[in-house]
Amino acid sequence: MKQSQNYKFWFATGSQDLYGDECLRKVAEHSQKIVKELNATGKLPFEIVCRPTLIDQASIRRTFNEANNDSECAGVITWMHTFSPAKMWIIGLQEYKKPLCHLHTQFNEEIPYDTIDMDFMNENQSAHGDREYGHIVSRMGIDRKIIVGHWTDPEVVEQLAGWMRTAIGVMESSHIRVCRFGDNMNNVAVTEGDKVEAQIKFGWEIDHYNVNDLVEVVNAVSQGDVDTLTEEYYQNYQILLEGRDPAEFRRHVSEQARIEIGTEKFCEDGNYQAVVTHFGMLGGLKQLPGLAMQRMMEKGYGFGAEGDWKTAAMVRLMKIMTAGKKDAKGTSFMEDYTYNFVKGKEGILEAHMLEVCPTIADGPVSIKVCPLSMGNREDPARLVFTSKTGSGIACSLVDMGNHFRLIISVVDCKKTEKPMPKLPVATAFWTPQPDLKTGAAAWILAGGAHHTAFTYDLSAEQMIDWADAMGIETVLIDNHTDLYQLKNELRWNSALYR
Ligand code: MN
């Protein structure tokens, strides 16, 4: 999946010129060692570059501005090895525009009981140097990630790695361009939103086309290309004819291959990374794009159905944030469909009309061709599968009229008790934390949508940090959720976001 840059992160250590050259030499040596060893862990998704120690206002301002102007720099990790008077950080911080991390660590893990003296104390005083720096960042109201602990601690490394992916989400958000074929579904409220505000807040460009603009490109795809991709489908997926004529089945499948090639060309030509369709606005398309959109998502495109551009952009965002992650389990557009209310087996069956991303599939992926009860087109081909088990997050971005709210539900994905042989769509099944009743009530209280952007590969913490960086409200629903507290939180937030 293409990001716009080969990103790197800068490590900027703060100090001052009060301590003498010998101390500053050690500060620089320690910073270089920390960076070298962090890079050597193999646990960080991006390289850290060690920058010269910052000792005065001029060097701080210059470094932050260089970070702004270096297109490869995705963020600055700051750490005060010694005391670094924070007034000299003000102008640099005022001018800095990228993600900021405050790694609150120190070079030594343990107090050197036998040898510690005042020289050591003066050289290793991040416990109070970082407080001075933290104060000015808080006073200036600047959002940043604070990570506390020794730099060799695996939890610290994991948090840093997680923040790096959040920072990439912040950097790449402004490169997300959503291509809408048709408008939002009439009368539906939650998929609507202020596109101008979305561009101001998130940087998203959300364009609209007549679906027949796409149809022209789809129809222009060569039969040879369609045949090649159809053959690829037949190699990669199981074919479930279920009594249909093989030739007729293949023709239906090849229509989706044609739509996939055409849509991808349209997106590449127009530099779009997310797509929105609408079953009620298909123009000259012969089928609702099903298999085609599933494949687009698998390639890293964002997708939203029924004109849902907010979820399409979120799916794209979350795919960028998880790109290249080792052992990734997948990210998809999703919809809450049907409940299982049986005691002890509670959960939500997740699916969509067709469009669920096969990156979340567990086991074989098959193609079916079945009628669609909505719309008036040919029976569309679609990929069917069940999804992986484990923890995940379902995210819904809603426009509350005066601000955006990101609702994050931590969910435990399970297998359904029994197979569902008559259901012709891909599914997932999950129980929201802390339990179905509380989780669903909390989601509804918060105004969450039926569509979600779902992933196994990001933590709630990462999405909260992203939303904080964007300056929007977050509502977290997890094992700590208490409905009484949540109601109060929503009331308090409504006073803040008005
Ligand atoms: Mn839907």
Image: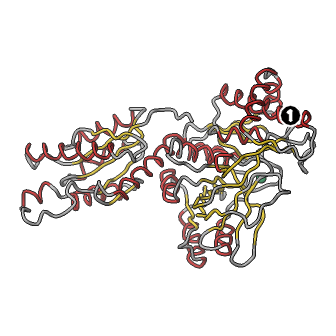
Instruction: Kindly indicate the quadrant of the structure image that contains residue 255.
Output: top right
On the picture, is 473 further left or further right than 235? Answer: left
Amino acid found under the numbered disc labelled 1: Arg
Q: Residue at x 58, y 55 (%)?
A: 456
Give the percent coordinates (x, y) of residue 147.
36, 57
Disc 1 crowd, CA 10 A, few/some/many (<14, 14-19, 20+): some
Q: Residue at x 21, y 52 (%)?
A: 81
In what quadrant of the picture does the C terminus appear? bottom right
On the picture, is 156 further left or further right than 218? Answer: left
Q: Nearer the viewer, residue 494 or 450?
A: 450
In what quadrant of the picture does the N terminus appear? top right
Q: Residue at x 77, y 37 (%)?
A: 181
Is the CB atom of the residue marked by disc 1 within 8 angstroms of ligand 1's nearest atom?
A: no
- Relative height, residue 196 to residue 130 (above, below): above
- Relative height, residue 165 to residue 396 (above, below): above
Colouring used for the render:
secondary structure
Give the percent coordinates (x, y) of residue 299.
64, 37
Q: Nearer the viewer, residue 91 or 184?
A: 184
The residue tagged 1 is 250
Q: Residue at x 90, y 33 (%)?
A: 247
Give the percent coordinates (x, y) of residue 228.
75, 25
Q: Secondary structure at mark 1?
A: helix
How many labels, in total? Answer: 1
